[in-house]
Image: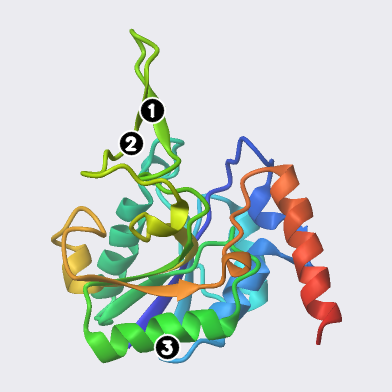
């Protein structure tokens, strides 16, 4: 059994009221809720937010929002991991013990239901502690990602290979972690502190499914891609 969680704070500095913004004809909250409700193996969808407006939008879209998130879990520096733990502990107190929690971030409007299905199927078939979605990376720490020493100003590769790499194709393959979904085994979540401490697996998705909304420009780009996708149907 998988419970889906829509974790959406009300405060957003880069894009005010970001989670309520309409992208592709529906709010980011509504899209996340409806996709979660349509995903295989998901039995329940809950919203965790400190915002009454977001909670109301989630309920209107079909999710449950039985409480507002405690303020100490809704600060700029708050870890979303702690909000995941809060939701699982609340479910346990209510007598419900799902095997997995699937966090469905609102900020990935190019995600599809089939993307989520791939993630839930991998979790169920593999029994992994964590399943995440990733995409091919444009940059590679073995080839074209550098740091600059704050004192000397010298540039160095993030990862120095044993032999110099002269083209990207020869570098080790790396991936960007996306905000499409994070599926965490609940027993693991209550004892670990990171998605990388246990058995973590990934579903590789198309890059254009993994756009992350952080700026107004990201919203414009997401709108463009959604319009292009809809025209292709």
Q: Are marks 2 and 1 in contact (CB under 8 Å)?
A: yes
Name the residue tied to disc 2. Answer: 158
Q: Quadrant of the N terminus?
A: bottom left
Q: Count the marks: how many?
A: 3
Residue at screen point 34% across, 60% down: 84
Can you give x and y, in whole percent of width and height, for residue 47 in the image?
50, 66
Depth check: give the residue in front, 173 or 67.
Answer: 173
Under circle 3, the secondary element is strand
Can you give x and y, in whole percent of width and height, for residue 124 in the image?
30, 89
**Mark 1 → mark 3, Cα distance in angstroms:** 45 Å
The residue furthest left is 191
Name the residue tied to disc 1. Answer: 147
Can you give x and y, in whole percent of width and height, for residue 33 in the image?
58, 74
Q: Earlier in the sequence, mark 2 or mark 3?
A: 3
Q: Earlier in the sequence, mark 2 or mark 1?
A: 1
**Mark 2 → mark 1, Cα distance in angstroms:** 6 Å
Can you give x and y, in whole percent of width and height, for residue 30 in the image?
66, 70
Residue at screen point 66% across, 49% down: 18
Q: Quadrant of the C terminus?
A: bottom right
Residue at screen point 29% across, 76% down: 94
Position of 70 relative to 35 (above/below): above
Name the residue tied to disc 3. Answer: 43
* Residue 173 in which image quadrant: bottom left
Q: Is residue 29 left or right of residue 9?
A: right
**For the residue carrying disc 1, how many other residues have a C-alpha within 10 Å: few (<14), some (14-19), or many (20+)?**
few
Residue at screen point 31% across, 59% down: 86
Position of 52 relative to 79 (above/below): below
**For the residue carrying disc 3, how many other residues have a C-alpha within 10 Å: few (<14), some (14-19), or many (20+)?**
some
The residue furthest right is 231
């Amino acid at each position: 059994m998988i419970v889906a969680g829509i974790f959406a704070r009300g405060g957003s500095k880069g894009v005010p009221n970001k989670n309520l913004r309409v992208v592709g004809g529906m709010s980011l909250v509504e899209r996340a809720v409806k996709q979660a409700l349509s995903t295989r193996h998901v039995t329940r969808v809950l919203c965790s937010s400190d915002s009454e407006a977001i909670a109301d939008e989630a309920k209107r879209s079909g999710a449950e929002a039985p409480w507002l998130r405690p303020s100490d879990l809704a600060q700029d520096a708050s870890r979303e991991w702690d909000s995941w733990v809060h939701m699982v502990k609340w479910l346990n107190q209510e007598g419900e013990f799902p095997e997995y929690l699937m966090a469905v971030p609102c900020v990935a409007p190019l995600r599809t239901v089939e993307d989520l299905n791939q993630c839930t199927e991998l979790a169920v078939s593999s029994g992994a502690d964590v399943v995440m979605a990733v995409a091919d990376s444009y940059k590679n720490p073995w080839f074209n990602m550098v740091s600059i020493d704050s004192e000397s100003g010298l540039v160095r590769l993030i990862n120095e290979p044993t032999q110099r790499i002269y083209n990207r194709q020869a570098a080790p393959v790396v991936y960007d972690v996306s905000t499409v979904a994070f599926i965490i085994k609940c027993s693991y979540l209550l004892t670990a502190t990171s998605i990388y401490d246990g058995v973590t697996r990934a579903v590789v998705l198309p890059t254009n499914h993994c756009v992350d909304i952080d700026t107004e420009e990201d919203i414009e780009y997401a709108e463009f891609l959604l319009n292009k996708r809809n025209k292709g149907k």
